[in-house]
Image (spheres, grey):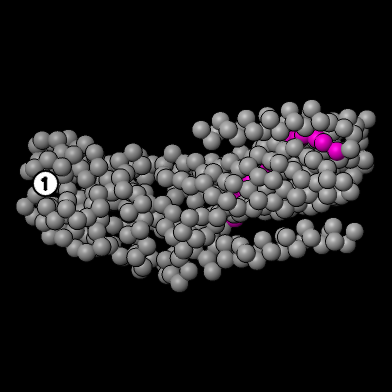
Amino acid sequence: MKNIIRRPLALVCVLALLSAGCIISGQFVILFDWGGIASTDQDLNSQRIDLTSDETWQEHKDNIQNIVDVKFEVEIKNLLGTTATGEVYMSATEYTTVAAVRANAIRILYGIEVPGNSSTTVSFEESAQYQENLSEALDLLETGQFYIYGIAENIPFSVEILEESRLLVTFSAGN
Amino acid sequence: MRRGIVPALLVLLVLLAGSTASATGIGVGGFGGVSIPLAQDDGEKGSVFGGHVKLSLGGILGIEPNISFFKNGDWDVEEGITLAGSTFSSVGVNLMLGASGPVTAMRPLMFVGGKYYSEDNDLRETDSRIGWNAGLGLEFGGGPIGVEVRGSFELMTLEGGGSRKWGHITGGVNFYFGAR
């Protein structure tokens, strides 16, 4: 009779021990203002993002297990008179030309239509429909530091990512 | 595809239980209650419901194939911005301690088991992973009907490390085939 009780209890203990690392982990969220960037097809600019400066990241920096999700809240202003198709890229190293970004960086948002001389806002919820290459983006986010670019598919372009734009990053952390 | 297979398996288990019923301990039950995300900033309290088949192995041991569906409630990114929580489903088998046959008066129960969890969220890529659950409960009743309350700890492992965890508090009704 004692074995009948002990065996399931032992199983619970073994599972608990095997999952010990998992049990004390959790999902945490960072809301990060990414600042403004203005670029043309001739004059590319980037924004350096440093998530490691965030308080929540700092709190868990030694125990981050993986990046679970990223969402974007983006306001793109089109400074030309014709409709632009906005794109957002990210990269580990900084690139200084549109061609280099297109060749080497990760395109994370694509297809954001911005009418001439006006702006379009994409909410966190809406960003999912424009998102691409999420797995690669999550891998890059694990470093906590990267460059972000706002350009347009059509040439010539002149677009500005407005300062209200933000990242929403969810990560798992635990011992 | 998986969504179709899981209910079909549950129906099969119920039919199997019915076809081999006896008063020695085969029952089916349904439950519902509250799902509480633990250490998850991207989800609030939500609901859980599901079903199980209770198969007695004799004495106070039993096994319990089960299926559940639960949801993390919507969560506030900040004031005015709310995002939908993920929806989850699980199939698994619990080892039961505390008898799985018809209940007389009241009995405690303890369980532990492996599960296969799936996450669904329209706003991002999601995953299906193994995990486990364990918990305690009480069952009341007589004859073919038992009413139970349970508390369980649920853990779904995540690709790349870490896990999602919940506390589930449920109430349910069981029907035991062949019991009087």
The residue carrying mark 1 is A158
Question: x, y percentage for residue B77?
Answer: 44, 50
B8 vs A33, nearest the viewer: B8
Left/right placement of residue A143 relative to residue B39 reads left
Q: State yes or no: residue A33 in magenta.
A: no
Between B153 and B74, the one nearer to me in the picture: B153
Q: In this rendering, is residue A10 above or below A158?
A: below
- Identify the amino acid type marked 1: Ser
Q: Is residue A118 visible?
A: no
Residue at (60% x, 35% y) in the render: B6
Q: Secondary structure at mark 1?
A: strand
For the image, the number of numbered tags is 1
Q: Residues within 10 Å of mark 1 (few under 14, many from 20)?
A: many
Queried whether the magenta region covers residue B30, the answer comes back as: yes
Residue at x 17%, y 51% (from the top left corner): A102
**For residue A42, side relative to residue A111 (left or right):** left
Q: Residue furthest bottom?
A: A62
Q: In the rendered image of this protein, does residue B49 appear above or below residue A43?
A: above
Res A111 visible: yes
In the rendered image, the quadrant that contains the C terminus of chain B is: top right
Q: Could you say where residue B106 lies in the image, as x and y percent from the top left?
A: 90, 44
- The chain letter under disc 1 is A
Decide if residue A68 is on the left or right side of residue B54.
Answer: left
Which residues lie in the magenta part?
A: B25-38
